[in-house]
Structure formats: structure tokens, C-alpha cells
Amino acid sequence: SYHKDPKIESSEKIRKRVQKAKDIQTKRFKGKNIHTNSEMTAKTIKEHCMLSQECVDLLRMAVSRMNLSARSYNRTIKLARTIADLEGSKDISSSHIAEALQYRPRLESL
């Protein structure tokens, strides 16, 4: 049944994970004029989102293949930072970048 599947998180577990991620962000931006990852500027992204070479390579590939704008590039990093926070991970991994890229809206044709 639905509630017995160990892979499915309960609402309570999800709520706790989200609260932990919020707490991480509150601590990260203490004394700054921002409160969440989504509010980061290019400067604060550089400060709080250290990327491994693997992450940089993945993003560069996405920029060329998906025609990412600078704004989309930064949005992807901010989302990857949030995904890492939800997992309780100090570092952003290439899997966090890959997941963030999956959430990009698909533009069929313009």
C-alpha cells in the first residue's frame, strides 16, 4: 500500500526536510539582505555555490546544448543549491546540477 512503501516520504518527513533547508539558508545568509537561495545575486552565488570541475563541465555542456542564458545558468545553480540543501549536502554535486537542469521548461518552438 501507499504508506508502506519505504521509498515514499511521509508529509511530516518532507516538512522536516524543508524546514531544515530553510534553516540552512537562514544561517547561510545571516546578516545579509537576502533570506533564500532564490534571492542570490551573481556575487552571492560565487560566494555560496562552490562548484567542482565536474559541475562546471556539466553546466558548460548545458549552456551549449540547451542555449542557456546567463540568467538561466544562475537560476540552475540556485536551484541546485536548494536541492543540495534539501538533501542536507554542504556541497553541490553534479547530480544536483543534473536534477536542476531537468526542471527547465522545454521550449518547443518559437
Image (cartoon, rainbow, N blue to C red):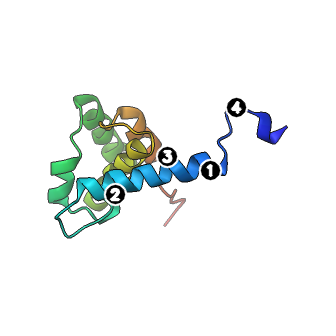
Q: Which mark is residue 12?
A: 1
- Estimate how packed mark 2 is, as few (under 14), some (14 to 19) or many (20 or more) residues with alpha carbons within 10 Å: many
Q: Is residue 65 above or below residue 38?
A: above
* Pointer 3 residue: 102
Compare residues 69 and 95 and report the one nearer the observer.
95
Q: Nearer the viewer, mark 4 or mark 2?
A: 4
| Disc 3 residue type (three-letter) | Gln
Could you tell me residue 87's position as x and y percent? 44, 39
Q: Which mark is residue 75?
A: 2
Q: Earlier in the sequence, mark 2 or mark 3?
A: 2
Tell me if 93 is positioned left or right of 15 in this view.
left
Q: Which mark is residue 6?
A: 4
Q: What residue is rendered at 29% in x and 61% in y?
A: 71
Kind of element beneath mark 1: helix
Residues under numbered marks 4 and 2 in contact, where contact means CB atoms less than 8 Å apart:
no
| Disc 4 residue type (three-letter) | Pro
Could you tell me residue 30's position as x and y percent? 21, 60
